[in-house]
Each structure stands twice: as C-alpha cells, then as structure tokens.
Amino acid sequence: MKNILIGNHKVIKHLSITGWAKINTCVLVAAALCSTVVSAASEEDSRESHFGVLHVYGTLTESACRLNMASADQSVNLGNTATADLKNVGDHSVLVPVPLYLHDCLRTSSSQYIENNNVAWSAHQPAVSFTFTGIGEPTNPQLARAEGVKGIGLRIKDAQRNNVILGQTGKPVLLSPGDDVILYYVTAERTRGELQAGSFSANINFRLNYE
C-alpha cells in the first residue's frame, strides 16, 4: 500500500488485495453484529407488545347464618322401643335430641312476627325458622311415615317440646350473633291401626328460612 502526502494529510492511493479482504471482513462482521442486535431488539419488542387484561368482578354480600355441614346431613338413632310402651294412640318413645348448629350469624334485626297476640322482634338478633318435609303417615299426616313397620309415625318437636307439623314452617327462633344451636327432637309415636314390630327408617328433609 502506498500513501501520497497532501499537506499534512495522508491519502490512501492503493490497497493490496489482502488489505481489501481485511476491510471487507471487518465490514461483514460489523454488519452481522448489527443484524443480531436489531433482530434481538425486534424480538424483544415483539414479546413486550403482547399484553392482556383480566376483567375480574364479583359481588360482596352480607351472609346470614351458615348451617354446619354435620347438622345438614346426620343420622338419628331412636334406639329400641318396646311395643308395650306404645299401647295407645299418641304414646311415644323417648325424645331423641337433634341439634342444628349455625355459624357466622350476623348481628342484624329480625322481622316481626306475632305469637299469642304478642309481637316478637329484635333489633340485634337475627331470626330463623325451619320447615320439615317428608312422606306423611297415612293416618296422621303430621307425622313422617316409618318404613318397615306399622302403627307408628315419627314426630318432630321443637326445643319447648311443641309439636312441629310436617310440611309447615315452624315458629321463628331468635339467634345469638355469631354461633348458635337450635334444638329439635324426634320420637316414634303410636298411630291408629295394627302395631307391627320391626326395623324402621325414614328420610326427613328440612329447610332453613331467614326471617
């Protein structure tokens, strides 16, 4: 390679083939690096440009009482009852308690209801009632039918030992805020007709009503 001096500057007059090859190689390497950087930047921009939105919605409501799951599905064993204890219509076996546990009851006012001309109401206690349903006993529809025997039906009573009529909404009960328990009883009661011994069973459904 030869240089020509013009003033204080050197001007390249001639490059050898080897020199040109080195320059071309540098240019190609630089171009490749630039292409890689541009490609990486392009991919990064492409990834960052894919955005999305989650539309989340719901409703926050005030909950009333929550029925304990063990109370919602339970078995009640009335034990053994002798036919000698059920001689007359209306005779019944031992009352077996059935507790219904309620949780997370709100401190809220209850609706007014009238019992014996007295208005019952609370500004701080919620009230609930229960409705029991099932297949009625043919001779006394207030009782649930006992499958497998004759001459008896199943009676439900509330905490005060009052009769609960099958299919009718019971008397409202005031609850303590937080957790509470409502007590009912089940008993086998003598009905009209032949008394036939044996094992018996029945399914009695109930519904919790907020007053």
Image: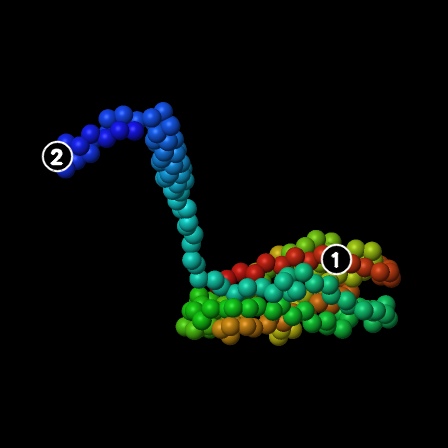
Q: Quadrant of residue 121?
A: bottom left
Left or right, 85 with reference to 104? right
Residue at horizontal 75%, vertical 57%?
A: 202
Residue 207 in view = yes
Residue at horizontal 77%, vertical 67%?
A: 77
Residue 191 percent coordinates (x, y) = 77, 62
Residue at horizontal 83%, vertical 58%?
A: 149
Number of numbered tags placed on the structure image: 2
Q: Quadrant of residue 35?
A: top left
User: Could you say which is closer to the camera, residue 45 or residue 155?
Assistant: 45
Spatial separation of the CA atoms under disc 1 and disc 2: 120 Å
- Which secondary structure lies at badge 1? loop
Residue at horizontal 41%, vertical 50%?
A: 57
Left or right, 181 with reference to 153? left
Q: Which residue is mark 2?
A: 7
Reply above or below: 139 against 123.
above
Residue 182 percent coordinates (x, y) = 60, 71
Circle 1/circle 2 CB separation < 8 Å: no
Residue 89 in view = no
Residue 165 percent coordinates (x, y) = 63, 62
Q: Residues within 10 Å of mark 1 (few under 14, many from 20)?
A: some
User: Could you say which is closer to the camera, residue 21 or residue 197?
Assistant: 21
- Which secondary structure lies at badge 2? loop
- Which quarter of the rendered picture does the N terminus lie within? top left
Residue 112 percent coordinates (x, y) = 44, 67
User: Could you say which is closer to the camera, residue 199 or residue 11?
Assistant: 11
Residue type beneath disc 1:
Ala
Q: How is the image coloured?
A: rainbow
The numbered mark at residue 202 is 1
Residue type beneath disc 2:
Gly
Q: Quadrant of residue 15?
A: top left
Q: Residues within 10 Å of mark 2 (few under 14, many from 20)?
A: few
